[in-house]
Image (spheres, helix red, strand yellow):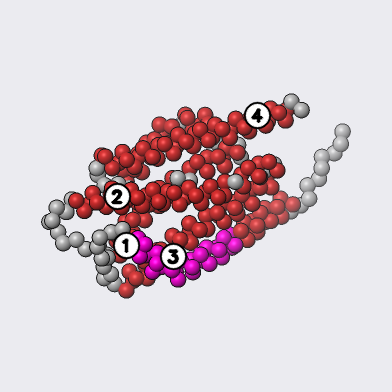
Amino acid sequence: MSEPEEQIPGEKEMNVGGHLTELRNRLIVTAIIFLLFFIVGFINVKSIYQFFVDDIDMQLTVISPAEIIWIYFSIAGLLAFAATIPVIVYQLWAFVSPALTAKEKRVSLGYIPGSLILFVLGLVFGYVVFIKLIFPFLLSLNDDMFNIMFTVDRYFGFLLKITLPFAFLFELPVVTMFLTSLGILTPAFMVKNRKYAYFILIVVGVLITPPDFFLQIVVAIPLIVIYELSIQLCKMVYRKKQAQHEAFMNE
């Protein structure tokens, strides 16, 4: 009987230390790229701001110098975050890729552009819902009772609270496919927990929309559709993964 292989003292600690160093380096690279995009957004804040205010028929008000700084940082930060998403996903992929097969690496790498596209689509969807449905509904409640005046930070703060949840929820298909390809998520789990997912999505729809049943339904339905689409994509990736496993076992 062969003797068990002797473990080199400190080998485990070195491996953990190496992973932590790699993770730190990837976070630093991501932070640098975020900062570069932030600077680009900061320089072009005026153009971006004008794009948003063109859709509303009123002049926003500033009541303190801090609001001017806030709008610069908010717009530049949102642009930087959206532009950095592919970098974040790539860094995550590169960190876990040593544990993947060559085919899994190629397939999962394709999720990177998809993550950016879905995030932008989520922002666009949230913005359209806000401009076309939520904002007009809120203004209609005034009924000439008040003199309407919106400050910059209150308007954009409310706008971000509406649009950002959509942007993150639209990432669900990509996250689902990625976790399924890693063997972490299964279609059975998503189907079993469908009613809980629906409840969470409806709650999100209620939280980010005014107390109007029609608006809440309009918001909740696309989120439920996204979840159902994620289940189908999960099934597709899972079947493909199972077929590859069976082919490997039959060799």
- Residue 58 in percent (x, y) is at 24, 62
* Helix, strand or loop at mark 3: helix
- Residue 131 in percent (x, y) is at 31, 52
Q: Earlier in the sequence, mark 4 or mark 3?
A: 3
- Estimate the spatial distance between the alpha carbons at disc 2 and disc 3, rounded to whole Å: 25 Å
Residue type beneath disc 2: Lys
- Residue 203 in percent (x, y) is at 34, 41
- Estimate the spatial distance between the alpha carbons at disc 1 and disc 3, rounded to whole Å: 16 Å
Residue visible at 36% across and 56% down in the picture: 160
- Furthest toward the top, the residue is 250
Residue visible at 66% across and 54% down in the picture: 19
Looking at the image, residue 68 lies above or below residue 56: below
Q: Which residue is mark 2?
A: 132
Residue type beneath disc 3: Ala
Q: Earlier in the sequence, mark 1 or mark 2?
A: 1
Please tell me the numbered disc located at residue 53. Answer: 1
* Helix, strand or loop at mark 2: helix
| Label 3: few (<14), some (14–19) or many (≥20) C-alpha neighbours in 10 Å | many
Please tell me the numbered disc located at residue 243. Answer: 4
Please tell me the numbered disc located at residue 182. Answer: none
- Estimate the spatial distance between the alpha carbons at disc 4 and disc 3, rounded to whole Å: 46 Å
Q: Earlier in the sequence, mark 1 or mark 3?
A: 1
Please tell me the numbered disc located at residue 76. Answer: 3
Q: Earlier in the sequence, mark 2 or mark 4?
A: 2
The magenta segment: 27-54
| Label 1: few (<14), some (14–19) or many (≥20) C-alpha neighbours in 10 Å | few
* Helix, strand or loop at mark 4: helix
Please tell me whether mark 1 or mark 3 is closer to you in this view: 1
Quadrant position of the N terminus in the picture: top right
